[in-house]
Amino acid sequence: MSGGSFEVIADFWDEQVGEEGDAFHRLLVRPALFRVLGEVAGLDVLDLGCANGATSRALADLGARVTGVDISPRLIEHARRREAARPRGVRYMVGDAAHLPELPDASFDRITASMVLMDLEDAAGAIREAARLLRPGGRLVATLFHPCFQIPDGSSWLIERAVVDEQISVRVWRYREPSRTETVAKVDQPAPTVHYHRPLDWYASRLVESGLLIDALHEAYPDDAFAEHFPEAARRLSVIPGILVIGARKV
Protein backbone atom coordinates (compact mmCIF):
# COMPACT_ATOMS: atom_id res chain seq x y z
CA MET A 1 0.00 0.00 0.00
CA SER A 2 1.46 3.33 -1.06
CA GLY A 3 0.56 6.63 0.51
CA GLY A 4 -1.53 7.72 -2.48
CA SER A 5 -1.03 10.89 -4.47
CA PHE A 6 -1.60 13.11 -1.39
CA GLU A 7 1.36 11.67 0.53
CA VAL A 8 3.89 13.84 -1.30
CA ILE A 9 1.89 17.02 -0.58
CA ALA A 10 0.74 16.03 2.94
CA ASP A 11 2.58 18.82 4.79
CA PHE A 12 1.36 21.44 2.32
CA TRP A 13 -2.19 20.07 2.50
CA ASP A 14 -2.25 20.12 6.30
CA GLU A 15 -1.07 23.73 6.30
CA GLN A 16 -3.72 24.72 3.75
CA VAL A 17 -6.61 22.84 5.38
CA GLY A 18 -5.71 23.62 8.98
CA GLU A 19 -7.70 22.59 12.03
CA GLU A 20 -11.23 23.15 10.71
CA GLY A 21 -10.81 22.81 6.95
CA ASP A 22 -10.34 25.48 4.31
CA ALA A 23 -13.09 27.96 3.47
CA PHE A 24 -14.29 26.00 0.41
CA HIS A 25 -14.92 22.91 2.53
CA ARG A 26 -16.26 24.75 5.58
CA LEU A 27 -18.69 26.94 3.65
CA LEU A 28 -19.86 24.72 0.78
CA VAL A 29 -18.84 21.06 1.04
CA ARG A 30 -19.30 20.30 4.74
CA PRO A 31 -22.72 21.96 5.19
CA ALA A 32 -23.99 19.92 2.23
CA LEU A 33 -22.45 16.74 3.67
CA PHE A 34 -23.97 17.27 7.11
CA ARG A 35 -27.38 18.20 5.67
CA VAL A 36 -27.64 14.80 4.01
CA LEU A 37 -25.89 12.94 6.84
CA GLY A 38 -28.31 14.08 9.53
CA GLU A 39 -27.95 13.54 13.27
CA VAL A 40 -24.78 11.69 14.31
CA ALA A 41 -24.66 12.18 18.08
CA GLY A 42 -24.00 8.85 19.77
CA LEU A 43 -23.33 7.04 16.48
CA ASP A 44 -20.23 5.18 15.31
CA VAL A 45 -18.94 7.02 12.23
CA LEU A 46 -16.11 6.09 9.87
CA ASP A 47 -14.56 9.00 7.96
CA LEU A 48 -13.01 7.48 4.83
CA GLY A 49 -10.14 9.45 3.30
CA CYS A 50 -9.98 11.66 6.38
CA ALA A 51 -6.74 13.45 5.35
CA ASN A 52 -5.61 15.58 8.31
CA GLY A 53 -8.89 14.92 10.13
CA ALA A 54 -10.78 18.19 9.63
CA THR A 55 -14.09 16.46 8.87
CA SER A 56 -13.44 13.81 11.54
CA ARG A 57 -13.04 16.54 14.14
CA ALA A 58 -16.22 18.26 13.01
CA LEU A 59 -18.11 14.96 13.32
CA ALA A 60 -16.71 14.40 16.81
CA ASP A 61 -17.80 17.90 17.79
CA LEU A 62 -21.35 16.84 16.84
CA GLY A 63 -21.15 13.95 19.30
CA ALA A 64 -20.16 11.06 17.03
CA ARG A 65 -17.67 8.33 17.95
CA VAL A 66 -15.30 8.75 15.02
CA THR A 67 -12.68 6.63 13.30
CA GLY A 68 -10.67 8.36 10.58
CA VAL A 69 -8.87 6.38 7.87
CA ASP A 70 -6.48 7.61 5.21
CA ILE A 71 -3.96 5.89 2.97
CA SER A 72 -1.35 8.62 3.57
CA PRO A 73 0.78 7.92 6.66
CA ARG A 74 1.94 11.54 6.75
CA LEU A 75 -1.60 12.91 6.73
CA ILE A 76 -2.51 10.55 9.57
CA GLU A 77 0.52 11.85 11.48
CA HIS A 78 -0.89 15.36 11.14
CA ALA A 79 -4.35 14.16 12.22
CA ARG A 80 -2.93 12.44 15.31
CA ARG A 81 -0.84 15.49 16.17
CA ARG A 82 -3.93 17.68 16.06
CA GLU A 83 -5.88 15.14 18.13
CA ALA A 84 -3.14 15.16 20.76
CA ALA A 85 -3.19 18.96 20.91
CA ARG A 86 -6.98 19.05 21.36
CA PRO A 87 -8.40 15.60 22.16
CA ARG A 88 -11.82 14.71 20.81
CA GLY A 89 -11.57 10.94 21.07
CA VAL A 90 -11.07 10.39 17.34
CA ARG A 91 -9.18 7.22 16.42
CA TYR A 92 -6.98 7.61 13.34
CA MET A 93 -5.52 4.77 11.31
CA VAL A 94 -3.59 4.31 8.08
CA GLY A 95 -5.53 2.17 5.66
CA ASP A 96 -6.71 1.59 2.10
CA ALA A 97 -10.39 2.53 1.80
CA ALA A 98 -10.94 -0.46 -0.48
CA HIS A 99 -9.41 -2.98 1.95
CA LEU A 100 -9.77 -2.51 5.70
CA PRO A 101 -9.52 -6.04 7.17
CA GLU A 102 -8.71 -4.67 10.64
CA LEU A 103 -12.24 -3.28 10.88
CA PRO A 104 -15.00 -5.86 11.54
CA ASP A 105 -18.18 -6.28 9.53
CA ALA A 106 -21.18 -4.11 10.44
CA SER A 107 -19.27 -1.90 12.88
CA PHE A 108 -20.46 1.60 11.82
CA ASP A 109 -23.76 3.45 11.71
CA ARG A 110 -22.54 6.05 9.24
CA ILE A 111 -19.64 6.32 6.81
CA THR A 112 -18.56 9.61 5.27
CA ALA A 113 -16.38 9.98 2.19
CA SER A 114 -15.95 13.72 1.76
CA MET A 115 -14.32 14.65 -1.57
CA VAL A 116 -12.65 11.23 -1.63
CA LEU A 117 -14.20 8.84 -4.16
CA MET A 118 -12.89 10.78 -7.16
CA ASP A 119 -9.36 10.51 -5.70
CA LEU A 120 -9.45 6.69 -5.46
CA GLU A 121 -8.30 4.35 -8.20
CA ASP A 122 -10.41 1.57 -6.66
CA ALA A 123 -13.50 3.57 -5.78
CA ALA A 124 -15.64 0.50 -6.50
CA GLY A 125 -13.71 -1.41 -3.85
CA ALA A 126 -14.17 1.43 -1.38
CA ILE A 127 -17.95 1.37 -1.94
CA ARG A 128 -18.04 -2.42 -1.43
CA GLU A 129 -15.96 -2.06 1.73
CA ALA A 130 -18.27 0.66 3.03
CA ALA A 131 -21.23 -1.67 2.50
CA ARG A 132 -19.45 -4.39 4.47
CA LEU A 133 -18.65 -2.08 7.35
CA LEU A 134 -22.12 -0.55 7.67
CA ARG A 135 -24.70 -1.94 10.04
CA PRO A 136 -28.12 -2.77 8.55
CA GLY A 137 -29.88 0.54 7.95
CA GLY A 138 -26.57 2.42 8.14
CA ARG A 139 -25.71 5.04 5.55
CA LEU A 140 -22.80 6.07 3.35
CA VAL A 141 -22.74 9.77 2.51
CA ALA A 142 -20.22 10.98 -0.05
CA THR A 143 -19.41 14.38 -1.48
CA LEU A 144 -17.58 14.72 -4.77
CA PHE A 145 -17.02 17.16 -7.59
CA HIS A 146 -20.19 16.93 -9.64
CA PRO A 147 -19.39 14.32 -12.32
CA CYS A 148 -21.81 15.89 -14.78
CA PHE A 149 -20.20 19.33 -14.76
CA GLN A 150 -16.74 19.23 -13.12
CA ILE A 151 -14.52 17.03 -15.28
CA PRO A 152 -10.77 17.75 -15.31
CA ASP A 153 -9.66 18.11 -18.92
CA GLY A 154 -13.26 17.45 -19.92
CA SER A 155 -15.28 20.55 -19.07
CA SER A 156 -14.96 24.31 -19.02
CA TRP A 157 -16.96 27.31 -17.85
CA LEU A 158 -18.43 29.66 -20.46
CA ILE A 159 -19.50 33.17 -19.48
CA GLU A 160 -21.14 35.16 -22.26
CA ARG A 161 -21.79 38.82 -21.49
CA ALA A 162 -24.52 40.84 -23.15
CA VAL A 163 -25.32 44.52 -22.66
CA VAL A 164 -27.41 44.04 -19.51
CA ASP A 165 -26.80 40.50 -18.33
CA GLU A 166 -24.63 37.42 -18.72
CA GLN A 167 -25.16 33.76 -19.46
CA ILE A 168 -23.19 31.17 -17.50
CA SER A 169 -22.87 27.65 -18.88
CA VAL A 170 -20.56 24.63 -18.83
CA ARG A 171 -19.20 22.93 -21.92
CA VAL A 172 -18.63 19.18 -21.44
CA TRP A 173 -16.81 16.93 -23.87
CA ARG A 174 -15.56 13.93 -21.85
CA TYR A 175 -18.48 12.85 -19.71
CA ARG A 176 -19.27 9.27 -20.68
CA GLU A 177 -15.89 7.56 -20.40
CA PRO A 178 -14.02 7.16 -17.09
CA SER A 179 -10.67 8.98 -17.11
CA ARG A 180 -7.62 9.62 -14.97
CA THR A 181 -6.14 13.12 -14.74
CA GLU A 182 -3.42 14.77 -12.67
CA THR A 183 -4.73 18.00 -11.16
CA VAL A 184 -3.60 20.90 -8.98
CA ALA A 185 -6.27 22.17 -6.57
CA LYS A 186 -4.44 24.97 -4.76
CA VAL A 187 -2.00 27.76 -5.60
CA ASP A 188 1.64 26.73 -5.06
CA GLN A 189 0.70 23.07 -4.61
CA PRO A 190 4.07 21.30 -4.85
CA ALA A 191 2.87 18.31 -6.91
CA PRO A 192 -0.34 17.24 -8.65
CA THR A 193 -2.82 14.75 -7.26
CA VAL A 194 -4.80 12.20 -9.24
CA HIS A 195 -8.47 12.68 -10.11
CA TYR A 196 -10.63 9.88 -11.50
CA HIS A 197 -13.72 10.93 -13.42
CA ARG A 198 -16.64 8.52 -13.58
CA PRO A 199 -20.13 9.29 -14.94
CA LEU A 200 -23.03 9.48 -12.53
CA ASP A 201 -24.49 6.11 -13.50
CA TRP A 202 -21.16 4.48 -12.62
CA TYR A 203 -21.61 5.58 -9.00
CA ALA A 204 -25.27 4.52 -8.97
CA SER A 205 -24.41 1.08 -10.36
CA ARG A 206 -21.59 0.46 -7.88
CA LEU A 207 -23.80 1.47 -4.93
CA VAL A 208 -26.66 -0.78 -6.01
CA GLU A 209 -24.32 -3.71 -6.69
CA SER A 210 -22.98 -3.35 -3.15
CA GLY A 211 -26.43 -3.46 -1.57
CA LEU A 212 -26.67 0.28 -0.93
CA LEU A 213 -29.93 2.00 -1.86
CA ILE A 214 -29.57 5.64 -2.88
CA ASP A 215 -31.83 7.70 -0.62
CA ALA A 216 -30.49 11.21 -1.27
CA LEU A 217 -29.04 13.22 -4.13
CA HIS A 218 -28.20 16.78 -3.19
CA GLU A 219 -26.46 19.49 -5.23
CA ALA A 220 -24.68 22.11 -3.13
CA TYR A 221 -25.27 25.76 -3.94
CA PRO A 222 -23.35 28.64 -2.33
CA ASP A 223 -24.83 30.88 0.34
CA ASP A 224 -23.93 34.46 1.25
CA ALA A 225 -21.02 33.41 3.49
CA PHE A 226 -19.45 31.47 0.61
CA ALA A 227 -20.03 34.39 -1.77
CA GLU A 228 -18.17 36.70 0.59
CA HIS A 229 -15.04 34.54 0.31
CA PHE A 230 -15.40 33.45 -3.32
CA PRO A 231 -17.54 35.97 -5.23
CA GLU A 232 -16.56 34.82 -8.71
CA ALA A 233 -17.00 31.12 -7.91
CA ALA A 234 -20.33 31.88 -6.23
CA ARG A 235 -21.62 33.50 -9.44
CA ARG A 236 -20.90 30.31 -11.37
CA LEU A 237 -21.90 27.77 -8.73
CA SER A 238 -25.19 29.53 -8.07
CA VAL A 239 -26.18 28.60 -11.63
CA ILE A 240 -24.54 25.20 -12.11
CA PRO A 241 -23.60 23.07 -9.08
CA GLY A 242 -20.02 21.98 -8.55
CA ILE A 243 -20.57 19.60 -5.63
CA LEU A 244 -22.79 16.51 -5.54
CA VAL A 245 -23.78 14.71 -2.33
CA ILE A 246 -24.91 11.09 -2.53
CA GLY A 247 -26.57 9.33 0.39
CA ALA A 248 -27.08 5.55 0.29
CA ARG A 249 -28.55 3.18 2.88
CA LYS A 250 -27.60 -0.44 3.54
CA VAL A 251 -30.69 -2.54 2.89
Image (tube, helix red, strand yellow):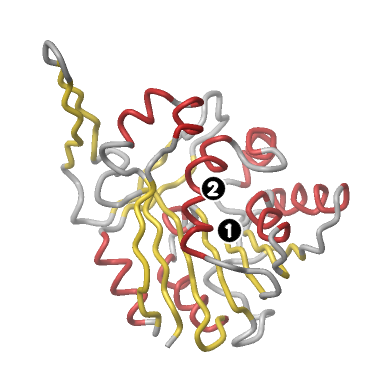
**Relative to 45, 129 lies left or right:** left
The structure residue drawn at horizontal position 11% and vertical position 15%, both measured from the top left corner, is: 162
**Relative to 28, 211 lies left or right:** left
Indicate the position of residue 228 as horizontal and vertical percent values: 49, 25
Give the amino acid at mark 2.
Ser
Which residue occupies the foreground of this view, 162 or 8? 162
What secondary structure is marked by label 2?
loop
Q: Quadrant of the C terminus?
A: bottom left
| Above/below status of 20 relative to 135 | above
Q: Are marks 1 and 2 in contact (CB under 8 Å)?
A: no
Image quarter of residue 18: top right
Image quarter of residue 181: top left
Which residue occupies the foreground of this view, 27 or 142? 27
Q: Which mark is residue 246?
A: none
Instruction: Answer few, some or many: residues within 10 Å of disc 2's Cα (few below 14, many 20 plus, some between 14 and 19).
Output: some
Indicate the position of residue 9 as horizontal and vertical percent values: 62, 38
Q: Earlier in the sequence, mark 1 or mark 2?
A: 2
The structure residue drawn at horizontal position 49% and vertical position 37%, both measured from the top left corner, is: 192
Circle 2 is placed at which residue position?
Answer: 5
Indicate the position of residue 56 as horizontal and vertical percent values: 67, 57
Give the amino acid at mark 1.
Gly
The structure residue drawn at horizontal position 61% and vertical position 75%, both measured from the top left corner, is: 100
